[in-house]
Amino acid sequence: MAMHLQISLVLEQHKPLLLLVPFQNDPCDVGGTRNGTCYTGAECDSRGGRSIGSCANGFGVCCAFTLQCGQTTSENCTYLVQSSSSAPMSPCKYTVCPASDEICRIRFDFTTFNINGPVTGFVETVLTMEGSTTVGGALGDCTTDTFTITAPENFAPPLICGFNSGQHMIVDASPGRCSDAVFGLRGSGTREWDIKVTQYNCGDEQGGPDGCLQYFTGTTGTVASFNFPTSASVLDSSATHLSSQTQTMCWRQETNTCAICWIPEILGNLITPGSFGLSTTSGRVASGVTEGKCRGDYLMIPSAESNVETDAANTFIIGSIGPDIQLSNRLCGRFFSSANDQDDRLASISVCSQQRPFRMTFKTDADEITLSKLPPPASGNANFANLNELSRVPGGIVGFNLRWTLQSCA
Ligand SMILES: [Ca+2]
């Protein structure tokens, strides 16, 4: 970071004394919800920032930057803000350029993120509709509002829409190449967002490893697919994950941790939807599915294992892979489980991995599967979990919201 010299003139005993006070242009926090960068008052003004307090023992000002639609910044710690009380322009494009050639990662934290959502479905305990439907092609598509971030010379994040407060995205940066964060807004609706943009130097562990769209630290937390209603304690039947996603999530291996486990934040059952549901099943009943039968939408977890002898809260045994445990790399279906036995896939249990680095990738294709068997059989319904993602709770359109916990080494 550039060293800055603050020059102060002090009169002492009638002789002028030039006092040089060096300080770094470090991030500063003066309370409240905004952070800034420490600059001199004049420098903050010339850079288009706003002073929100003092720093460097009063020699600098904590300078906050808020970007408007259409503007460009190369300042670290910039906010993209749209209040719900005013109508945003569309498209609203913010251009974020690396603050220096040393920047490798740019992180966008969605403190608030509310735009129109995708086409949603409605999951029924047993869907009794007759005939086939073509709704599956549109489910999860962002047909009105969209948000994208470009990442020149690198993998771009997936296109998203809907509710994403609490989520974040990190892009890999290349020297001199700017990223465009673009809101495309069509039709009516109240939108609001408050996004903090932080830049990280190459090699700064806080920025997370290259290629990780999301990066988590600490020993426990939650992780969700985009547009998941994470603020709801009861899941609505119309919760629908987005189409065409590639979401790579990475975790820091904290000191003395040797495994990571995940379990749905809302467990759910055959009547009440839980916070996991991806695609169809291999059989007619709602169950967890693994490996090659997960083709359209799935979570990829290297060497995932479910220990059925332990309860949901989990007492995972590090370094032990029992004879009844298989290692899976893909999970999908209606319950979160990688258990070897089919009976142990009729409810969600914790899934753990001892493979490092700790990571998981969420993939979805362009469509949801909403077939029904023709003609309906005499039993009255033709829609099984293996044919229709809207039939049988938990549905296959849900996506995921999982609690994760790092496990201490033995
Ligand atoms: Ca799909």
Image (cartoon, helix red, strand yellow):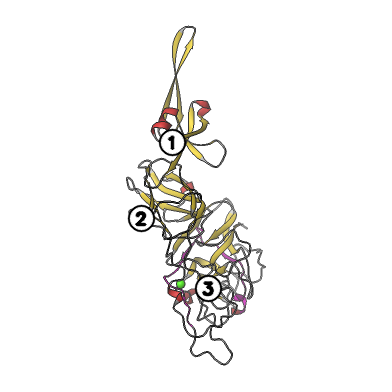
**Could you tell whether 268 is left or right of 53 in the image?**
right
Q: Amino acid at mark 1?
A: Gly
Residue designated by label 2: 154
User: As displayed, is residue 361 above or below residue 376?
Assistant: above
Q: Amino acid at mark 2?
A: Asn
User: Considering only order in the chain, which callout, 3 or 2, is on the residue closer to the N terminus?
Assistant: 2
- Cα separation, mark 2 vs mark 3, equals 31 Å
The residue closer to the viewer here, 98 or 259, is 98
In the image, which disc is placed on residue 396?
3
Percent position of residue 314, x then y: 65, 64
> Do the residues bearing badges 1 and 3 touch, measured as CB atoms within 8 Å?
no
Residue designated by label 1: 49
Magenta portion: prevailing SS class = loop
Q: Nearer the viewer, mark 1 or mark 3?
A: 1
Q: How many marks?
A: 3
User: Considering only order in the chain, which callout, 2 or 1, is on the residue closer to the N terminus?
Assistant: 1
Q: Nearer the viewer, mark 1 or mark 2?
A: 1
